[in-house]
Amino acid sequence: MNLTLDRKAAVLFALVAVLYIGTGFVQSWNTALSILNMGLISAIMALGVNIQWGYAGLFNVGVMGFTALGGLAAVLVASDPVEGAWGATGGWQVLLALLMGGATIAAAIALWGKMKGHNLRGLAMAGLLIAGFFIFRAVFDPAVATVEAIDPALTGNIGGLGLPIILAWPLGGLLAAGAAWIIGKTALGLRSDYLAIATLGVAEIIIYILKNEDWLARGVKNVIGLPRPVPYEVDLQANQAFVSAMQGLGADPVTASSITVKLSYAVLFSIVLIALIWLTQRALNSPWGRMIRAIRDNEVSAAAMGKNVTARHLQIFILGSAVCGLAGAMMTTLDSQLVPSTYQPLRFTFLIWVMVIVGGSGNNIGAVLGGFLIWWFWIQVEPLGLLLLQGITAGMAEGWLKDHLMDAAAHMRLLTMGLILLLVLRFSPRGLLPER
């Protein structure tokens, strides 16, 4: 029987739900909810990439950079202020130096335009940038040294505003959108392959800054203990009403507290995901969405009809990056920490692209399906692969072959992701839920 796209979507989502529910019964509900929460965040990231690639054909492989900016927003908003960091020669001087650096770049751009055709334009530009660089360093370096000297074992950074961390979610989107605007103004004129190289390079620069600028977010020393928008397990366990209610249901209060926290996160993340699906679907089916897809399908024809292709590409690039930044802030909220070394292209770029391709690029519901499905496989394939290899090698004699097969279990994730991608591209090249 040929299923319509809506029925096919319902069947596929039901199968994914069976995977998550089965995980709860076979392993534990704590495990299932942990996978679900990261699946929700992954689905939001996949939506962001789908906006860029599925709507407009923009090949962004710098997803991890925008995700990391969302995580940085969580630190700047929710972590406690560091006493003394904003003194006369501390945070304010760092901010002044950054403004001076931005002013130097703006002045160089203006000078380049004004001296068009002048023989000394290049020399004047170089002189301005060199002078601005030395002035910037003269102000910036002493301020950074002052901030990083403040109790470096515990802080050594400017700290945050001490506000509720949920406020960092929209700020993470805004921070990523600002970075996308800067990148897009310079890189969106490039061909798709060069755009990919440019976005990957900028993402690496962002991660490099997070790792090495201790004054900003402690670098590789990490920021831990960020506040939560949901209760802590220990607080629930100390709440007599909660303990009595769980005991009345025959549940262990310790386990129930952990499940309650994860369910609370799932509710918050689901609200954001549902809102984004509604907004993206409305946008896709609007005249604006049809115009974006027309530009994607034939830029020359769209430009001939008076559409500003570059401006629309910049708009889409900013929107998709903002969604990735929002997801990054949510992920840091879930982890309660920012660890720059964990932002790897394999997890935050390749895996998200696999989600979009498998789910169906150009289809928002397909991207969400890919987010849930691929994340479940990413987490579960390694332990399932280990069980499989243990069964295969159970009757083998001890030796190099058995050891080699058991060691291969650690690589089951990459093998499975590649196999899934190949199968989908072979039998359903437009994804499980293709664009209508």
Image (cartoon, helix red, strand yellow):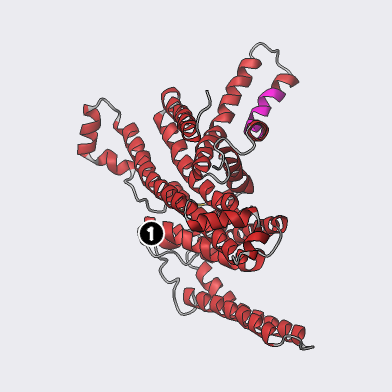
Say whether residue 405 is magenta.
yes
Q: What main secondary structure does the magenta stretch of the protein show?
A: helix
Q: Nearer the viewer, residue 221 or 30?
A: 30
Q: Nearer the viewer, residue 257 or 352?
A: 352
Point 62% across, 78% down: residue: 105
Q: Is residue 186 above or below residue 110?
A: above
Return the residue found at the far top: 395
Q: Position of residue 267 (x, y in %)?
A: 35, 43
Q: Which residues are magenta?
A: 404-415
Question: Is residue 178 toward the left or the right of residue 113 in the image?
Answer: left
Where is mark 1, residue-wise?
A: 167
Q: Quadrant of residue 28?
A: top left
Point 54% across, 52% down: residue: 51
Q: Is residue 208 above or below residue 22?
A: below
The C terminus lies in quadrant: top right
Q: Is residue 81 above or below residue 24?
A: below
Point 62% across, 61% down: residue: 302
